[in-house]
Image (spheres, rainbow, N blue to C red):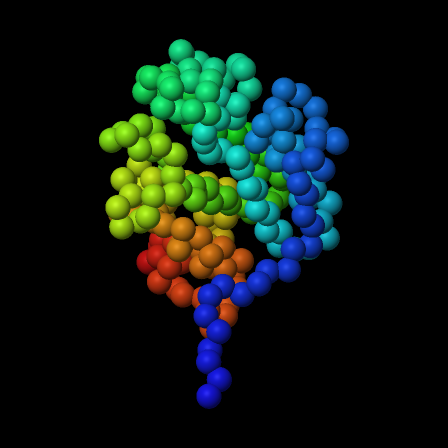
Amino acid sequence: MAHKKLGEPPIKVASYLSSGDLKKNCEGSECDYDGVLLSHLAEQIQESDKQKVFVVLHQTGSHGPSYYSKYPKEFEVFKPICRSVELSNCTQEELINAYDNTVLYNDHFLDQLRKTLEGLKDTSSAYLYVSDHGESLGEGGIYLHGTPYSIAPEQQFKVPFFVWMSPSFIEQKHISVDKLRAREKSTQANVFHSVMGAFDMDSEIYNKDLDMFRAARQQ
């Protein structure tokens, strides 16, 4: 008897660009950081001949241990910082400061992404942002990530999940922003099915109960 294949289906990627590829045409102080991902993003979307465009931006984010190297100097607001990859050699204050600077830069990155999408005239758009894991910063003597889930501290598995939507996307999908904000919890499991819902895609693997946008529709 044939067994039904489980898991998400493979996705055909039309265009893949590494940070090295993007740096070639990047200008400014953020080309060595996550900001390079936004270099000419608007032009690439506008130049597409497709009616719908799906983009994945894979950030370095706040991934340790070298937190101090993840942001431009102008975002080094919290000081003093840890400048070692041997995190146990730093004070917790230095470690938290370096980490908080990465969060500050990430906030800037997400705001720039919002502005980029807002600049796409006559285009309905949205983005989902979710971390793959959190980071331990010395709480209980634990650092970084990768601790087995059964014993992992909450710092490693409670992560941010943001949704931004253009006014036209909200209107087209009949979304109640209040309903979306009122969600008690969202996880990585919601991403795949919410993307399918955003693109009006259907499949036997699609689970409407995991589609955040469907759950937030106005009655």
Percent from the top left, x then y, of residue 12?
Answer: 64, 60
Q: Pick out the residue farthest to the bottom.
A: 1
When asked about the image quadrant of residue 21, the answer is top right
Q: Is residue 74 left or right of residue 152?
A: right
Give the side of residue 181 with respect to residue 167, left or right: left
Residue drawn at the location 69% of the way across and 50% of the way down: 15
Residue 101 lies left or right of residue 46; in this view the side is: left
Nearer to me, 17 or 185: 17
**Residue nearest the observer in this picture, 139 or 196:** 139
The image quadrant of residue 86 is top left
* Picture residue at 42% right of the left edge, 15% below the top: 81
**Outermost residue, top side:** 80
Q: Residue at x 46, y 80 (%)?
A: 3
Residue at (46%, 34%) from the top-left corner? 63
141 vs 126: above or below: above
Q: Give the image location of residue 99, x and y in percent.
A: 41, 25
Q: Is residue 197 above or below residue 76?
A: below
Towards the viewer: 23 or 168 = 23
Q: Is residue 106 above or below residue 29?
A: below
Can residue 161 be seen from the camera position used here? no
From the top left corner, tell me how far across and down residue 165 is, in percent. Answer: 47, 43
- Which quadrant does the C terminus fall into? bottom left
Is residue 207 in view from this perspective? Answer: yes
Identify which residue, 202 or 109, lies in the foreground.
109
What count of labels does the image hold?
Answer: 0
